[in-house]
Amino acid sequence: MLSIDLTWRQYFEDHHEGLGTTYERFILHQYFERIKGKYSVQNILEAPSFGMTGISGINSMWWAAQGVPVTLMDDNEKRLELIAHVWKDIRLEVEMVFGKDFDSLPFSNNYFDLSWNFAALRFVPDLNRFLEELTRVTRKVIFICVSNMWGIAHVTRFALGKKGETTPIRPESLVAIMERLKWQTKERGYLDVPPWPDIAMKKEEFLKAIGLKRLAEAFERGNGEGVSILDYFSGKHGGLDKDILKYSFLENSPTIFKRFWAHHHYLIFTPK
C-alpha cells in the first residue's frame, strides 16, 4: 500500500481548495449529468473515495443533491469521520462504509447502478481484485478517472525524478482487466482541461507567480476566504459554477491537444 499524503487533513480545517480542484469538481458534474441521464442511475458507490487534493469525500455531492443515494467507502476511519461532518454541515445524505482494504466490498451483487472513483486507484493494493469486486457489485456503469500519464506536467515530473511521485495507472491496463471481467469500454477520453498546467500548487498562487494577479484574485473572496465548492452546495455562493466554468473553453479542444494538456483520462465501462 502506498503511503498516503497526510496533507488531506488540512482541508478539513481550511476549506480553501484552490481554483484547480474546484474546477475539476465542476467538470465532473457535467459528466455526472450525462451519465445519470443515459444510464438512469438510481444509486451510486464511490470507492475509494480518497484520491485527490482538497476536501476528501465530497466529489459525489452532486449526486446527493440530485436525490440519488450515495455510498462512500474509505480505508481511513478518521477521514470518514471528518467526511461525515462535512456532509452533515451541507445537509446532504450519505452512507459511509469503512473497509480495511478494497479486496472485498461489503455489498451484494449488482447492488449499485454506478460505481466510480477519481484519481484513487493508486491507493488500491490489488487492482485486479478490486476491479473484480467493483464489477461484481455494479449493475450498469463504471466511471473511472486516472491521472493523464501523457500530460506535459506528469511527464516532466517523472523525468525530473520528483520524490513522492507514483507510477500512474495506465488506461490500457484498466481496459485489459475489465475485458477479462467481461466489461466493455463504452467511452474514453480526456477531461479536466483548464488553461493552467497540472502543477502541485494552488492555481491562484501560480497565476500570481506568472504576473496574472487580477485573474487570481477573481477567484478569491473579498472577505479573505478561499474557494470551496462547499459554498456552492450550501447556497452561500450559488453562482460559483458559472464563475469557474468560464474557463472551460479547452474541454472540447482536439484530442491531440488534450492528450498532452489534460490533467485526467476517463473511462466509462458497461457490462458486455
Image (tube, grey):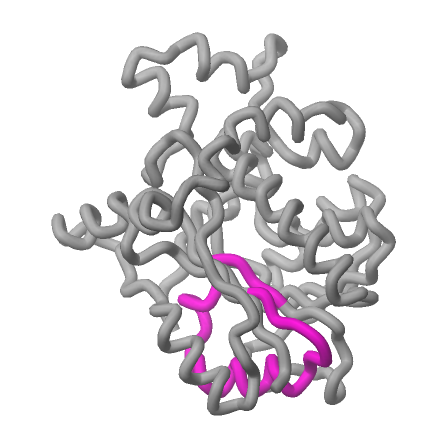
The residue sitting at the front extreme is 254
Observer able to see residue 94: yes
Locate the N terminus by quadrant.
bottom left
* Residue 169 place in picture, x, y as percent: 36, 67
Question: Is residue 129 left or right of 162 when viewed as pictured?
Answer: right
Q: Position of residue 225 (x, y in %)?
A: 59, 19
* 113 part of magenta stretch: no
Q: Nearer the viewer, residue 237 or 11?
A: 237
- Residue at 69% in and 36% down: 230
- Residue 231 image position (x, y, % from top left): 71, 30
Above or below 83: residue 196: above
Name the residue at 83% across, 58% down.
68
Q: Which residue sits at x=62%, y=22%?
A: 243
Q: Relative to 34, does residue 218 appear above or below in the rendering? A: above
Q: Is residue 101 above or below residue 76?
A: below
Residue found at x 83% / y 66%: 42
Q: Nearer the viewer, residue 5 or 116?
A: 116
User: In the image, 108: left or right of 213?
Assistant: right
Above or below residue 161? Residue 212 is above
Count of numbered labels shown in the rendering:
0
Q: Is residue 137 magenta?
A: yes
Image quarter in which the C terminus is found: bottom right
Query: Left or right: 225 with respect to 113?
Result: left
Which stretch is magenta? Answer: 116-143
Can you tell which quarter of the image residue 25 is in?
top right
| Residue 80 point in image, percent of width and height | 65, 59
Q: Quick check: can you spot residue 75?
A: no
